[in-house]
Amino acid sequence: MTSEIDFVNRIFYSYEHYKEPSFSIRRFKHANILPLIERLKRSEVFSISKAGESVQGRSINLIKFGNGKAKVFLWSQMHGDESTATMAIFDMLNFISAYDGFNDFRKLLAESLTIYLMPMVNPDGAEAFERRNSLQIDLNRDAAAMQSPESKLLKETFDKIKADFGFNLHYQNILYSAGHTFNPATLSFLAPPVDNERTITNSRSNSMKLIGYLFEVLSNFIPGHIAKYKDDFEPRAFGDNFQREGTSIILIESGGWKDDPEKQFIRKLNYTALLAALKCIAERKYINLKTDVYENMPFNEEDLMDLIIRNVTYRNNGVEYKIDVGITRIETNSDNAKEFYYQSVIEDIGDLSTFFGYEDYDFEGMELLPGKTFPKKFNSLTDALKLNPHELYGQGFTNIIIDSGEENKSQKNFPFYIIKHEQSKSPALKIGEVANFILKLNDKTRHVIVNGFLKEP
């Protein structure tokens, strides 16, 4: 295994040479990958074909490399807002088409494998940066009914290829932890079951072996941050159905990593995982591996929140209580799907000692007060921004009223939570409400939380 880890280290640490510069954010669209597809067409290394079209007529392309006996099929972004692996695929294609010290590895891939890649299976969903396609169908729950053209296309392509291995590339909620730990599940893997009994067929056994290999080599970079996706059988999912048809399927779910909102580090991990897996398949090393590493991997657990404040004092009807407050932030699309805003929610209140926050603070001794709404109404954001937020924070105000019809699209660094006049109501500490708080010590404002983001007064 030492030589394998050394090779994967070389792949990981040379990544910047092959990183596709077109992607710096995860909210890109079909139009952003078309020039990359055209560039690949000019290369002698790849064969490009148009596999079909989406509901709205956007092209779905199939890329082929190599002429080896073993066939591998990779597809990404069947959920339109799960773009991490699509970036990694184009990074990997840059690697494959390069000419340098990895040429022996490229030759191995070309002679041992025939690799097929279908990036962005759901281009209409990517356009709106939404999970579902333009018919509002979840493509990964359409493997049985085949109601969408994208689903039919994916199945037709799979049937033609008859791949030995398949990589189903997804994204999962960043609030999953790797087992009952405080570590985000940055990558999660699954060898999909073929039935409710989770029968281990030959194809599933090979999936398990390969995932165990990836767990070991990738743990060198993110120890304690790799988990196993819940393995309930889903008869409508493509991975489960393709596994049942004899292709060894590896599901990769990209999760969370602190301070990586655009998934650039997780993109690098995807790139590394895919190239490491292709090498293992090309050299047939998975055959002699065992399934026990996979079987002992921790499952995803839901033990994380975006922000937790601990040990704060809260007064209710004159009685003091010491509580923890957990907050999650929901990412919401704006009219332009390249942009988004957050809507915070109070997720839980009480003893949160078994949970961990990406931001986690002990505010022992501080009193929590729900933020108040400033009584004056404003006609626009421009007018409201003339306020001095620190003066208002000191008076306990976190919310402002804007009557212009502008929705609350508060970004992380916006000083106030915007509400409409008809939404104005008495502040409360309640699960499901927006997280707007003042934290006081000795009757002086020490911290402010606006729409789930901690600010200094």
Image (cartoon, rainbow, N blue to C red):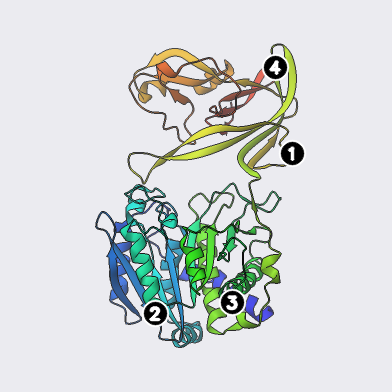
Q: Position of residue 308 (x, y in %)?
A: 65, 36
Nearest-to-viewer mark from 1 and 3: 3
Amino acid beneath label 2: Phe
Residue at the spot 55% in from the left edge and 32% down from the top edge: 345
The local crowd at label 3, few if under 14, some if 14 to 19, many if 20 or more residues have their Cα within 10 Å, is: few
Q: Quadrant of residue 421?
A: top left
Q: Position of residue 254 (x, y in %)?
A: 53, 57
SS type, badge 3? helix
Q: How far is the residue under mark 4 from the one under mark 1?
A: 21 Å
Amino acid beneath label 1: Ser
Q: Quadrant of the N terminus?
A: bottom right
Q: Which residue is mark 1?
A: 353
Left or right of residue 250, residue 139 in this image: left
Q: How far is the residue under mark 4 from the one under mark 2?
A: 65 Å
Q: Position of residue 321 (x, y in %)?
A: 74, 21
The local crowd at label 1, few if under 14, some if 14 to 19, many if 20 or more residues have their Cα within 10 Å, is: few
Q: Are marks 4 and 2 in contact (CB under 8 Å)?
A: no
Amino acid beneath label 4: Arg
Q: Quadrant of residue 385?
A: top left
The disc label shown at residue 315, or none = 4
Q: Which residue is mark 3?
A: 202
SS type, badge 2? strand
> Is residue 133 among the parts visible in the rendering?
yes
Q: Which residue is mark 2?
A: 65
Does residue 360 lie above or below 29 as drawn?
above
In primary-sequence order, the first of circles 4 and 2 is: 2
Nearest-to-viewer mark from 2 and 3: 3
Q: How far is the residue under mark 3 from the one under mark 4?
A: 60 Å
Q: Position of residue 42 (x, y in %)?
A: 28, 76
